[in-house]
Amino acid sequence: MSQQVQEHVQAVIETIKKAATTYPTDVTNLLEKLANLNVSEIEANQQALFYSLHNIAMDQPNWTFVAAQLYLNELYQKAATNRGYDSGLKYGDFYSLLSVLSEMGIYNKGLIECYSKEDIDDLGKEIAPERDELFTYIGLFLLADRYLAKDYEKNIYELPQERFMVIAMTLMQKEKKEKRLELVKKAYWALSNLYMTVATPTLSNAGKSYGQLSSCFIDTVDDSLDSIYLNNWDIARLSKDGGGIGIYYGKVRALGSDIKKFKGNSSGIVPWIRLLNDTAVSVDQLGQRQGAVAVYLDIFHKDVMNGFLDLKTNNGDERRKAHDIFTGVTIPDLFMQKLEEVDESGRSIGEWHTFCPHQVKQIMGWKDENGNLLGLEDYYDETDRKWFTEKYEEAVNHPLLPRKSYRAMDIMARIMVAQLETGTPYMFYRDEVNRQNPNKHVVGVGRTSIYCSNLCTEIAQNMSATTITKEYEDEDGNIVIVRKPGDFVVCNLSSIHLPNAVKANVLEDVIPIQMRMLDNVIDLNTISVGQAQKTNQKYRAVGLGTFGWHHLLAVKGIYWETDEAVSYADELYEEIAYHTIRSSMELAKEKGAYKQCKGSEWETGAYFKRKGYTSRRWSELQQEVTKHGVRNGWMMAVAPNSSTAKIGGSTDGIDPIYAIEYAEEKKNFKFKVTAPDITHHTYPFYRRVRHELDQVWSIKQNSARQRHVDQGISFNIYVRHDIKAKELLHLHLQAWKHGLKTTYYVRSTSQAEIAECEACHA
């Protein structure tokens, strides 16, 4: 064995010894084995790594940090070999890294052109290799496997702290030069200490020469062949660059409707959704994963019971299936009220009618101030006037309007059957979403401005369809199509690592830099769909979220199923909301408010009144917002955060843990994982896990935090596979009554692993 290898093996042994001293365990056999190894440096390290991973358990959870350290040794050596420096240094010259990867075309050359060598050398000195020790093994593995920059042969070049610094440099590159380096250092501080994470597209693509930085997109499809196919084209382009996509199909005519007055010719929405399904599968995201698309339909659309609810189920005609898309239903308060109508025997008797949106517009003839025909989907129920209910009852009472009628409970039963089999459809409570919209002033009182959510149900922003206004031949003989851009929703996500940020008491410091980073994404991004780029600039919407809720409760000693947990959610998310809104106001003072701010509920103060923010500090903030506006039309959204929560070494989003000890398995790995920070102190607060917890307590917690979140929250309902229909119905009714805007998957114990949109794992 060479001297170098002997030294390396001895270093590995010392690492193991240190861990064994701190967390007693039997490592004698390993130490003897390592002492006699006559293998290469990396092979010795891998032997120790395998041992460490094997020993991770509920009573020995900290072996994950030993494994992470051993894996870091590999990363350091591989990066050093590929970049030509001594691996003992851990990190090489930062400027050289930027130069080499820019020359290769991996990094965008604009980054090294924007910052001087002196700037980059200064930032290189800020890189803190010791912060690599904050990673668990699975967090480090995911970061290295999916996000660190590699060459075209997939050889590792970039190391974890360099990824964080490149993200910080990228997001601050357009700031004023006199304060730019200071802002880069602040952003690096927040990222490298794992006080926050950026969303997957930003984590993966920032500083690189490909991909875009935004997480979520939502489009509205009009009832025309042009709109359907142009939407498909737009979705393909977005899918290519990454990002989860939601699509509203409630305006497209139903099966059996007329086309050009020829009756019974429409094939309905199912064939078009199948087309989207094929697009999602065909256009993948740089080979990493197929596109991810969710399609939403109104519960009063005639096709909801004519194929839509069965799109993902395994029974029925395969020619009317779309197994690779996700589904969501948009539900008015009136439908939920119908579910509660019962006769003397307790039998549900509420009747529900479904209509073709095309026929509603033809026969009912409602018009807006510009003479455009409106449908049922274009109204919602406000607190002081039930606009949707009025129009719905008018449609029901019209003798010439075709409809298909059901017991409301029969529709709900179909929804719940599909949810227990496939996890979907998602639930979107359209009246509550529109009532709570701070930008409803754009379309007027009682008029729907938000028709659906995104793939992960946390985004709620104004939407409208893009239309073709004319097509002509220009003087050069080119055929030119002119499109009037609608509001094509874009959201940029980032999340606070709750346990780390709360423990360090840095929320007040982290949120302003986080909001600046999010806001800068809007100006840096190059979205391939023009109307999405335009909408992004118009509203400057961002989604600051959180992860690690169960982890935080455990370290604070708060049980999940308690009023204390509900109260703490209310208190903590109000604090986050305050700093978020204040940060956006400060950005507006510096850079200007978003274009549609005037007349919004931010500017008028209606948002603060509706939320009941009456304390002195809130009143003072309201006055400042009225004076200066805010930079961002929407600010908060809590995403699922599965991948980035694992990178941060914490628990997913606002979800309870899956199990105290389990195997995390994806297509290229299977690791043993334990609940974060598990000790004899935290164990009791982790003991009851997802499917064992009373979901009503989860709903109450989410209701408390939803009050402070201007968009939505990815909220899963966890149930046992043998749950009774009335019990699941009760949970849905509770979610609606507690004012939740959306619910995400219904995850039952019998379902296979449900694939999620990784774009929203902020």
Image (spheres, rainbow, N blue to C red):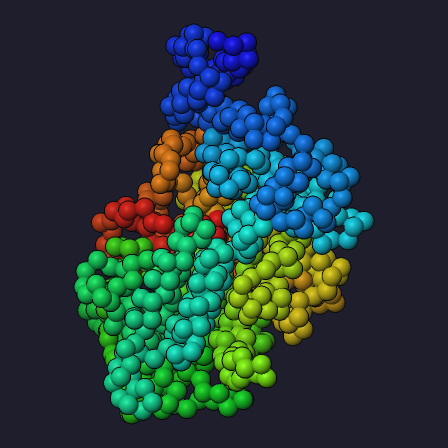
- Residue lying at the far front of the rendered structure: 476
Q: Quadrant of residue 536?
A: bottom right
Seen in the picture, residue 578 relative to 133 is either above or below; the reply is below
Residue 137 pos. (x, y %): 47, 30
Instruction: Tell me where residue 529 appears, x and y as whole percent.
Output: 53, 66
State the residue at coordinates (77%, 53%).
176
- Given residues 628 and 223, the one toward you in this image is 223
Q: Image check: 64 left or right of 689?
A: right
Identify which residue is drawn at 69% across, 45% down: 112
Q: Position of residue 362 (x, y in %)?
A: 37, 90
Residue 640 seen in render: no
Camera-side residue: 38 or 189? 38
- Image vertical order of residue 633 relative to residue 378, above or below: above
Residue at position x 45%, y 53% from top?
A: 285
For image coordinates 53% across by 74% down, the residue present is 486
Q: Compared to 207, does 438 lie above or below? A: below
Q: Give the quarter of the image for residue 661.
A: top left
Q: Nearer the viewer, residue 274 or 620?
A: 274
Q: Horizontally, is 416 left or right of 247 in the view?
A: left
Q: Is residue 641 visible?
A: yes
Q: Position of residue 105 (x, y in %)?
A: 59, 46
How many tags in the picture?
A: 0
